[in-house]
Image: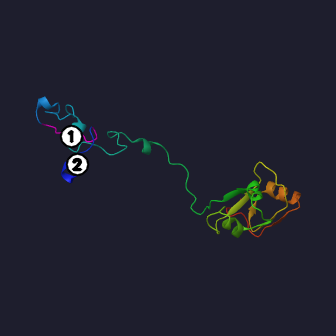
Amino acid sequence: MKLNTIKPGIGSAKPKRRVGRGIGSGLGKTCGRGHKGQKSRAGGFHKVGFEGGQMPLQRRLPKRGFTVYGKKQVREIKLSTLQLIDLSEFNPSVLYDHGLIKNINDPVKIILGNQLIKRAIKIKDLIISRGAKEAVEQMGGLVELTVKDVNGV
């Protein structure tokens, strides 16, 4: 095989469209742009959202709400997920080691979920929901809280 004999596959390369080369080409005179109007002229395209001078939709609608920049996203972990790990004590470093959280400093909240736990566990330094706390204590587990909810909820 030589480089000067290589050709693209049949139908894969379309020939360049040559406009304005006479009426026989099918793209003569107006070059496929039609007659008159803004879109037929050179540089005749308007910006996105432009409505011909009418007040654009994004400016007609009212502004609503705001973004709370100080709010932290709390990672929620179900008690049933903790049941899958064969440990009796859980804290942020244990969750990080088992890949349940990506950053050890991220806030984590333990929630009840839809299944009850089957063994006693100890939860330390993690935010926990009221239902999850009751479920842990009902099975004889222990909850030590030294962390308050990060968003004050």
x%, y% of residue 68? 58, 59
Q: Is 118 situated above or below 95? A: above
x%, y% of residue 21? 11, 36
Give the residue number, with chain letter if any, for mark 1. Answer: 15
Magenta span: 11-20
Q: Which residue is drawn at 53% across and 48% down?
A: 64
Q: Verify whether residue 13 appears in magenta.
A: yes
Q: How many marks?
A: 2
Residue type indicated by callout 1: Pro
Q: Is 152 situated above or below 115? A: below
Q: Residue at x 44, y 42 (%)?
A: 60
x%, y% of residue 151? 67, 61
Q: Is 73 situated above or below 55? A: below
Q: What is the quadrant of residue 58 in the picture?
A: top left
- Which type of secondary structure does the marked residue at label 2 adopt? loop
Q: Verify whether residue 146 appears in magenta.
A: no
- Which type of secondary structure does the marked residue at label 1 adopt? loop
Residue type indicated by callout 2: Ile
x%, y% of residue 103? 62, 67
